[in-house]
Image (spheres, helix red, strand yellow):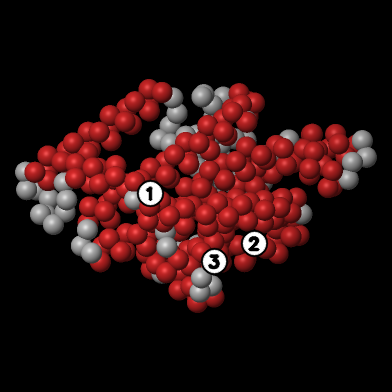
């Protein structure tokens, strides 16, 4: 069921989502609380079968000569991936990637959620910030890597800065969208009892927008690894999974490059599933109201 939408926080007309997302559409996702490729144990089993089938087909294609010889077999890549956790250097690089990801995500939440609350409740601030948001939001974070490395010579700082930049947009937009979904009657009720704008925002608007903010966090988590590994590939001085891949590639160890890629995907999937499970548990009331199943 699509959330009820009034006037978007940054929109050009009625019945549009935030930043003109279109009539009746959610922001940056199919709705709060939806998991990876849908929900439910049945789809999880089908997803697992699909992955196994894809890997088996790739293995057969490799052994049949349909894949270039310089690429290792899937079985070889998986075997190498199974041994990487025993490599102390790889464990250090994983921590070097996850640290800036978590720090950048925390900073983005601390900055973007209050900013979204301000823009979503004060029309003047929203109109003033709209041109800047519309200008900065489409800029790819990868295009800012040279600037980030120049401003922050330390690799960890550059990764953290770009993670903050990238994660801020889904958090900001989803917060504003959630505020547009708040029941106006609830706000008017508190105002009639003498509560000021700040109290109304903290007691009604922010709790009502919390499921949408959680969705923004889940979307942000999905892109943190992408940004961090991209920085590490282009500026490997700070270590990390991308630096590990660069070193393995220079040694012509494509099996280790691909094995590290597998682990990056596993980490991203695990983080997404963890946040999805927490989101569903915390906002069960919201899923019951919108009719979303678990």
Q: Which residue is mark 2?
A: 130
Along the line of sight, the residue nearer the viewer: 160 or 27: 160
| Above or below, 223 relative to 287 | below
Task: Calculate the distance from the C-alpha at mark 1 to the C-alpha at mark 3.
Answer: 20 Å
Q: Which residue is mark 3?
A: 157
Q: Position of residue 60 (x, y in %)?
A: 12, 39
Front disc: 2 or 3 = 3
Element class at badge 1: helix
Along the line of sight, the residue nearer the viewer: 188 or 147: 147
Along the line of sight, the residue nearer the viewer: 186 or 20: 186
- Left or right of 183 on screen, residue 274: left
| Above or below, 243 relative to 23 | below
Quadrant of image for the N terminus: top right
Q: Which residue is mark 1?
A: 264
Element class at badge 3: helix
Proximity of marks 1 and 2: CB atoms separated by less than 8 Å: no
Q: Residues within 10 Å of mark 3 (few under 14, many from 20)?
A: some
Q: Which mark is first along the chain, 3 or 1? A: 3
Task: Calculate the distance from the C-alpha at mark 2 to the C-alpha at mark 3.
Answer: 28 Å
């Amino acid at each position: 069921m699509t959330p009820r939408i009034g006037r978007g926080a940054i929109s050009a007309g009625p019945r549009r989502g935030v930043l003109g997302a279109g009539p009746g559409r959610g922001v940056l996702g199919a709705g709060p609380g939806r998991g990876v490729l849908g929900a439910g144990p049945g789809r999880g089993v089908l997803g697992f079968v699909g992955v196994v089938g894809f890997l088996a087909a790739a293995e057969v294609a490799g052994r049949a000569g349909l894949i270039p010889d310089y690429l290792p077999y899937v079985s070889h890549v998986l075997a190498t991936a199974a041994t990487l956790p025993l490599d102390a250097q790889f464990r250090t690089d994983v921590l070097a990637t996850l640290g800036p990801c978590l720090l950048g995500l925390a900073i983005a939440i601390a900055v973007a959620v209050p900013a979204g609350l301000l823009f979503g409740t004060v029309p003047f601030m929203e109109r003033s910030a709209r041109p800047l948001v519309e200008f900065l939001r489409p800029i790819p974070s990868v295009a800012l890597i040279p600037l980030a490395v120049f401003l922050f010579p330390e690799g960890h700082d550059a990764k953290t800065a770009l993670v903050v930049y990238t994660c801020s947009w889904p958090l900001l937009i989803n917060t504003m969208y959630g505020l547009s979904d708040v029941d106006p009657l609830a706000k008017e009720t508190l105002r009639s009892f003498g509560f000021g704008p700040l109290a109304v925002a903290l007691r009604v608007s922010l709790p009502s927008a919390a499921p949408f903010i959680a969705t923004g966090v889940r979307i942000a988590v999905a892109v943190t690894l992408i940004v961090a590994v991209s920085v590490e590939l282009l500026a490997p001085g700070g270590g990390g999974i991308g630096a590990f891949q660069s070193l393995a590639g220079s040694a012509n160890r494509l099996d280790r490059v691909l094995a590290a890629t597998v682990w990056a995907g596993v980490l991203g999937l695990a983080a997404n599933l963890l946040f999805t499970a927490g989101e569903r548990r915390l906002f069960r009331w919201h899923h019951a109201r919108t009719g979303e199943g678990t």
